[in-house]
Amino acid sequence: MRYYNPFRELESVRREVDRIFNGYTGGSLLSRSSLAPAQINVYENSDDVEVEVLLPGIDPKALDLQVVRNELTISGERRQSEDVKPEAWHRQERAAGKFVRKIALPAEIDPDGVKAEYANGVLAIRLAKSEAARPRRIEVAVA
């Protein structure tokens, strides 16, 4: 006996829509955008939060970083190759266009203590924690 699975039907519809639109967009309309940075590492120490983002092929001048409290917003644009005519493409898996990615950070950030570097397709961001978010040593008084 075979049970009805509505998700199997939805997956079939998704694949069919992807197949139809694949030639127009260079990728799936229903899957996660290939424009937004997908590979992000976030880690922290006592003073900073560190973020590494893979952004190969992006001009660092086209990136915009904004920090509000404990949220980092990375936006930018991946440019389409202007050397290739649209009708000449046989396969195009690297999408072009604007992207935005918001990342929740584990602590509140001091906006004046943010530094970013881009090298070899990796954006490295060091975000200083706000003074209130940093751990403090509290001495215990002996009575």
Image: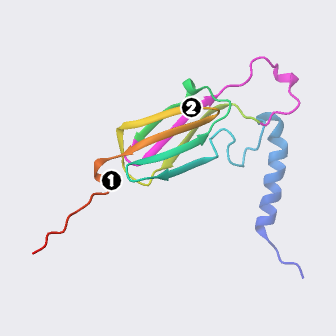
- The residue shown at (63%, 36%) is 55
> x, y percentage for residue 43?
50, 52
- The residue shown at (52%, 50%) is 42
Image-quadrant location for residue 136: bottom left
Label 1 close to label 2 by CB (< 8 Å): no
- The residue shown at (81%, 65%) is 8
Q: Disc 1 on helix, strand or loop?
A: helix
- The quadrant of the picture occupied by the N terminus is bottom right
Q: Which residue is mark 1?
A: 133
Image-quadrant location for residue 127: top left
Q: Residues within 10 Å of mark 1 (few under 14, many from 20)?
A: some
> x, y percentage for residue 52?
56, 43
Mark 1 or mark 2: name the one nearer the start of the chain.
Answer: 2
Magenta stretch in the rendered image? 68-93
Q: Which residue is mark 2?
A: 118
Question: Is 103 colored magenta in this rendering?
Answer: no
